[in-house]
Image (cartoon, rainbow, N blue to C red):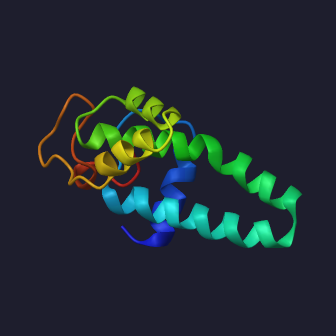
Amino acid sequence: MNFQQAVQTCFRKYVDFSGRASRPEYWWFILAYVVLAFVTGFIHEYLYFIVVLAFLLPLLAAGARRLHDIGKSGWWLLLGLIPVLGGLVLLYFTVQPSQPESNEYGPPPALVPAGA
């Protein structure tokens, strides 16, 4: 999955917390958010606020799908509320390789048909 496909997929699944997201899909989307937030932060604070709001739900949904991809519940995202340690644990989870087999959240992302 390339950068453009990842961003399109994450916005198409705006609030879809089901299914799985591969590492490239998740990390390309994170990169898009960080770059856009950084750039708009220099332009104007209101524009930055709009970008943060526009990305909030897709980031949560992509994070939950990424956790599903390694066999964890999306509720693990709540670890992010714990300062420093929670973020480090989530970082560790999100860099883990995908489970190659189907799990309770569905088949691996590569096996999901393009229109699904």
* Nearer the observer, 101 or 59: 59
Determine which quarter of the picture holds residue 64: top left
Image quarter hosting the C terminus? top left
Determine which quarter of the picture holds residue 104: top left
Residue 20, given in percent of the width and then of the height, sits at: 33, 42
Residue 92, given in percent of the width and then of the height, sits at: 30, 50
Identity of the residue drawn at 84% across and 60% down: 47
Tally of numbered discs: 0
Residue 44, given in percent of the width and then of the height, sits at: 87, 66
Identity of the residue drawn at 51% across and 52% down: 10
Q: In the displayed structure, would residue 75 be above or below residue 108?
A: above
Q: Is residue 116 left or right of residue 69?
A: right
* Residue 71 makes an appearance in the image: yes
Q: Is residue 53 left or right of residue 100?
A: right
In the image as oriented, which residue stretches furthest toward the left? 101
In the image as oriented, which residue stretches furthest toward the front? 84
* Nearer the observer, 82 or 61: 82
Q: Is residue 112 left or right of residue 13?
A: left
* Residue 20 makes an appearance in the image: no
Identity of the residue drawn at 63% across and 44% down: 56
Q: Is residue 103 left or right of residue 39?
A: left
Q: In the displayed structure, would residue 15 be above or below residue 39?
A: above
* Nearer the observer, 10 or 37: 37
Identity of the residue drawn at 36% across and 55% down: 114
Residue 61, given in percent of the width and then of the height, sits at: 50, 40
Image quarter hosting the N terminus? bottom left
